[in-house]
Image (cartoon, rainbow, N blue to C red):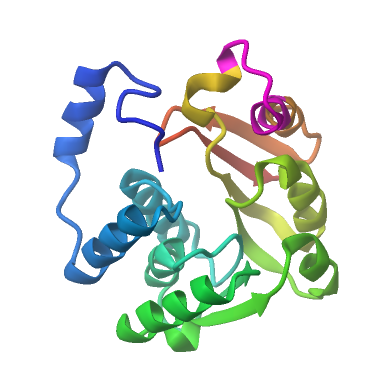
Amino acid sequence: MKARLDAILQRDQAEYLDRLLPQADRLLTEMEAYAAKHNVPIADREVATFIEITARMSGAKRALEIGMAIGYSVVHLARGMGEGSLVVTIEPNDEMIKAATDYTQRAGLSDRLRIERGKALDVMPRLNETFDLLFIDAVKEEYQHYLDLGLPKLRTGGVVIVDNLLWGGKVAGDHNDSSTAALREFNQYFINHPELRAVILPVGDGLGYAVKS
């Protein structure tokens, strides 16, 4: 979620775009309220919508998500990919897994989800599968490792989406905390990666978007 509404854009622009977003359905609204109440980081609504549109447009049928939380992005991915698809998602927190399992069951999407419990850097090397879409939204200091482990599992022409790359605008300033420094370094790595055609968009809290060549 954004650090604040005007973290990236000027406030009037951010408020205008926020008003344009259609009302979420009852389940998603409940998930947003739960995340706000319990301080659970989930994707901004426009980011989640972008992910769903991308999944649908690209024809993706298998997605790998790094960082599930309560399953907000899972719901959007699974809805976008449609019947017969599979989201493989990695999450170490039992409380988050319990909440996500409940929400995805209520959404009627349990058959499109496989949860891998554990830390992503431990789980990813064990996955011997090929994916159409890779979504990264977990420990910021580990983003480069996620990309390095995920790219060999992504098909040529597959899509990479990475959240929080502008980090409340801090990456463009003089902040040097560990997350900001790691994201600043990752952004350079991502944009210049020889296997990717990549861009960073001022959507949500900054969204990396790339296609594997």
Report which quarter residue 131 is drawn in.
bottom right
**Residue 187 visible in rendering:** yes
Report which quarter residue 7 is drawn in.
top left
Assess whether residue 175 is covered by the magenta stretch.
yes
Give the dominant element type of the magenta stretch: helix, strand or loop.
helix
Residue 69 placed where, x, y %?
50, 64
Image: magenta residue range? 172-184
When the figure is inspected, residue 120 is found, relative to residue 208, above or below; the finding is below
Residue 186 placed where, x, y %?
72, 32
When the figure is inspected, residue 42 is found, relative to residue 193, above or below; the finding is below
Residue 94 placed where, x, y %?
57, 76
Q: Is residue 16 left or right of residue 84?
A: left
Q: At 20% from the left edge and 59% from the top edge, which residue is drawn? A: 24
**Residue 84 visible in rendering:** no
* Camera-nearest residue between 182 and 212: 182
Quadrant for the N terminus in the image: top left
* Camera-nearest residue between 134 and 176: 176
